[in-house]
Amino acid sequence: MDHALAGPQRGKWLVSRDAEYNSQMENHTWDLVYLPNGKKAIQCKWLAKIKTDEKGEPSVYKSRLVAKGFQQKEKEDYKEGPSLSSFPSHPTFQLCFNAFSIMSLNL
């Protein structure tokens, strides 16, 4: 983002960055809180991307604020929960229900 803000399109990048920040605040994506003693804040950075139209001309200046999640330590900064891949998918449930109905089993 620093490189984008130093260029000739600075005004468009500032509008894009402010819009992303305001959107995150309105949607309560995160809250500003006091950092507990002994804890280290996870850093974040701004990403900048230009989206182009069908002619290849810049049409949207897109900014994103992302956390550097790789700095987190499991069991210290977060607790690992079950991953979505460990849950049966919809087709698996459908297959089970079909088998139960064929065998006249009650759930």
Image (cartoon, rainbow, N blue to C red):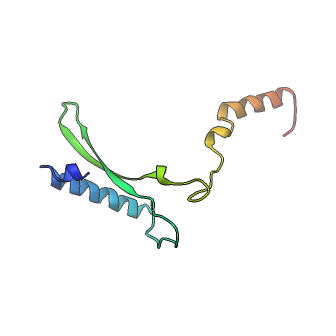
Work out whether 105 lies above or below 35.
Answer: above
Given residues 27 and 33, the one toward you in this image is 33
Tell me residue 62's x, y (percent).
28, 47
Point 51% across, 67% down: residue: 39
Given residues 4 and 15, the one toward you in this image is 4
Work out whether 47 lies above or below 29.
Answer: above
Tell me residue 88's x, y (percent).
69, 36
* 94 relative to 28 in the view: left or right: right
Tell me residue 20's x, y (percent).
33, 56
* 26 relative to 60 in the view: left or right: right
Given residues 14 and 45, the one toward you in this image is 45
Q: Quadrant of residue 41?
A: bottom left
Residue at the left extreme of this rendering: 8
Given residues 63 and 44, the one toward you in this image is 44
* 49 relative to 12 in the view: left or right: right
Tell me residue 96's x, y (percent).
77, 31
